[in-house]
Amino acid sequence: MHLRSPVPSSRPTRTALAVAAAVLLASATAACGDAGGLQGAGATPTAVSPDRLWPDLTPASSPAFEIGEVDTTAVKGVTVPGGNVHDVDPVSVVRAEIAANPGDYGAGAYEETARRMAGCGRSGAAGRGCPVLKAYYRDLTGDGHDDMTLGFRQLPGNLTAVRVYTVRGHRLVQVMAYEDAVSGVELAGRSVIIRSPSEVAGYEYRLQWTWDQQQHAMLLTHDEMLRTGSARRSPGASPSTSPGASPGPTPSSRPAPSSSASGR
């Protein structure tokens, strides 16, 4: 069997192909020199692995400070017959908390809060003294139903109590509680973000509580100090002077939630 050799291209054809290839190469070379071509990013920083300190130190087996962030409790005296948290009166929820904690609100640190509750629901100057703030509703637990984020002033002092409630069956359940000198509160996704003034000029504390499906509670997932860009000292009481606050575990000496904020 004889294999046919491929028919060689004619000289004019080979010349045309060579010219076309040269034009394409010249075009590609010119394109690489354009401003839109690849540019060097400079030297790449050398990756540094973390250094483990004190490898012989015996690991701690229990927390030094009890934050109580997985403590949840049903609110006594408040029911949700229809299972809709929108039907719950926020003032009744705060009154139930005050009744459950007479040591804090009777003749305790926040007795002014209890006294001003008498103005809630009233009009005029009396109503303006009500310490309960507007309630906000969003599905934070991911069950397809709204949950309630509630705030109220802790008086006397400069503290704001932040609470999150969900509905389980016909019960109102508190799944997050925290109080501090608050400069802002935000809801984002499944999280509650609390910003608090810092004693360090130009910085603020930022805490993020996020719903955890396994614990069925809002967990403190971020606790950090961030720069605000302002060189002025934050106004109001510093979180480190919050009544009833205990020393916190973070390097910035941030206090852990007080006993009334960590759930009961």
Image (cartoon, grey):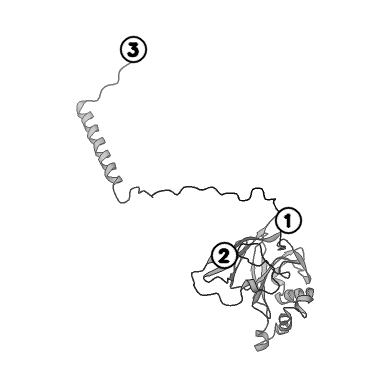
Say which amino acid is labelled 3: His
Q: At 19% across and 29% down in the image, what residue appears? A: 12
According to the picture, the residue beneath numbered tag 1 turns out to be 62
Q: Quadrant of residue 123?
A: bottom right
Residue 143 place in picture, x, y as percent = 68, 59
* Mark 1 / mark 3, whichever is N-terminal: 3
Q: At 54% across and 65% down in the image, what residue appears? A: 226
* Mark 2 / mark 3, whichever is N-terminal: 3
Furthest residue toward top: 1
Say which amino acid is labelled 2: Met
Q: Please tell me which residue lies in front, 108 or 25.
A: 108
How packed mark 1 is, by other alpha carbons closer than 10 Å (few <14, some 14-19, many 20 or more), is: few
Number of the label disc, if any, that sits on residue 238: none
Say which amino acid is labelled 1: Ser
Distance CA(mark 1)–CA(mark 3): 87 Å
According to the picture, the residue beneath numbered tag 2 turns out to be 225
The quadrant in which the N terminus is found is: top left
Question: The residue tagged with tag 2: helix, strand or loop?
Answer: strand
* Mark 1 / mark 2, whichever is N-terminal: 1
**Contact? badges 2 and 3 (CB < 8 Å):** no
The quadrant in which the C terminus is found is: bottom right
According to the picture, the residue beneath numbered tag 3 turns out to be 2
Mark 2 or 3: the one toward you: 2
Distance CA(mark 2)–CA(mark 3): 83 Å
Residue 126 place in picture, x, y as percent = 68, 87
Question: The residue tagged with tag 3: helix, strand or loop?
Answer: loop
Q: Please tell me which residue lies in front, 210 or 233.
A: 233
